[in-house]
Image (cartoon, rainbow, N blue to C red):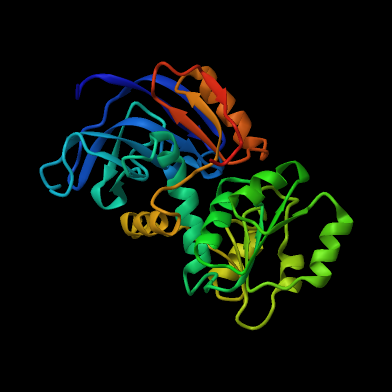
Amino acid sequence: LDMATMKCAVRLSAGVIEFADAERIPVPTPGTVRLRVKAASLNPIDYKMPKMSLGKFVGCDVAGVIDAVHQSVTEFAVGDEVYGVVQFGKSGGIADFCLCEAKMIAKKPSDLPFTKAAAAVVSYITSYGALVDKAKGGMKAGDTVLIIGASGGCGLAAVQLAKGLGASEIVGVCSRRNHDLVLKAGATRCVDYTDPNAFTAMVEKDRFDVIYDSATGADKQTNYWPEAAKMLRDKRSRHVSSSGTYWQWFKTIFGLSGKQKVIFMDLSKVAIDLEEICRLLGGTIDTNIEMVALLTADGLAAALEKIRSRRARGKVVFSMEEENPAVVTVSHQLS
C-alpha cells in the first residue's frame, strides 16, 4: 500500500486546483496517523491561499478511519473513526488518504456522519474561538450577538454556537432567501443585506455586545467594518472578522484596530474544542451541507465553482463513498 497511488486534489498555485489520480499514498511520520478518508470539506482558504502557505495538497478538515499509526502515537489505533485537521503543508483531506498529527484529531461521535464531521472542524472551531475567546469576541451568556454572513458555513456555525452559549438575541445578516435557514439554526431574527432600508435601520438603531463577521474580505468590495463600528454597544463590545482587507490585517497584527479585529484560526486544542462544541450543541454537530461531491475531476470542478460563487448555504463536502453520484445538492433544512 505504501508504494501505491491515490486520487486527490492538488494545488498548482493560488486559485489553481486540479484533480490528480497518481499521487503517492503517504506514510505516517513521527507523531502522525494515516486516515483512509471518508469525507473532507472545501473551504475558501483552500483556493485563496498560495501554495507556499498550505502546500501542494488541498483540504484542511477531514473525517475518516485510521489505517496506519506511527509507533510514536499511543492514543489512537487502527480502526478508530476520527475527525480533525490534516498535517498542514504536507497533506490534504481531499484525497483517498491523508496524514494527521495525533494532537490535531479527535474520536468522532458514533452518531455523527462522516460528511457532517468533516464539514464541522474548521468552521465550528473558528466560530467558537471567535465568540468565546477573551481576546476575540469574549461572549458571555445574555449577550446580544450579530452575525454577518449568517448563512455560510462559519455563519451558521456561529448562530448555533451563540444559541448554545446563551445569547439573549441573535441577529443574522443574510439574503432574504436564507432567512428560514438561519432562523432554524437559532437566530431570533434576520436582516436582509440587499434591502437598504432594513439594513440601514439596523445600523442606526441596534447595538450589540458581540459582532461576528464572516463576510468582510470575501471579495474586495465587501467591508462591514464601518457599519459594525456604529453597532457596538459599549467599551466591552467587540467586532471580530474572519477575514479582512490588508489594512485591517495590518491594524490587527500591530494592535491598532481597537474593538475591531481580524481573527486567526486557532487550532492549538482541536480535540478539546470539538468536545466542548459537541457539548454546547447537545452531544453532536448538526452541520448544514450545501453540496456533497465525489472525488473526481467533475466533482472537484463543481465544488470549486460552488464555493467560489460565495452563495453556498452551509458547507461544500467531498465524500469518498463510491456509491455517491459525482455531485449532489442536498437539502438546506437543518435537522
| Percent position of residue 300, x then y | 52, 25
Left or right of 129 on screen, residue 331 = right
Q: Quadrant of residue 87?
A: top left
Left or right of 334 on screen, residue 173 = right
| Percent position of residue 302, x then y | 58, 24
- Figure check: 89 above or below 202: above
Judge by depth and name the residue closer to the eye, 62 or 159: 159
Q: Quadrant of the N terminus?
A: top left
Callout count = 0
Q: Residue at x 24, y 48 (%)?
A: 102
- Figure check: 217 above or below 317: below
Left or right of 45 on screen, residue 202 = right
Q: Can residue 257 be seen from the camera position used here?
A: no
Judge by depth and name the residue closer to the eye, 166 or 207: 166
Judge by depth and name the residue closer to the eye, 24 or 153: 153
Q: Residue farthest to the right?
A: 197
| Percent position of residue 296, x then y | 47, 19
Q: Residue at x 48, y 74 (%)?
A: 134
| Percent position of residue 21, x then y | 38, 18
Q: Quadrant of residue 254?
A: bottom right
Q: Can residue 311 be seen from the camera position used here?
A: yes
- Figure check: 295 above or below 118: above
Q: Residue at x 62, y 48 (%)?
A: 184
Q: Residue at x 30, y 48 (%)?
A: 105
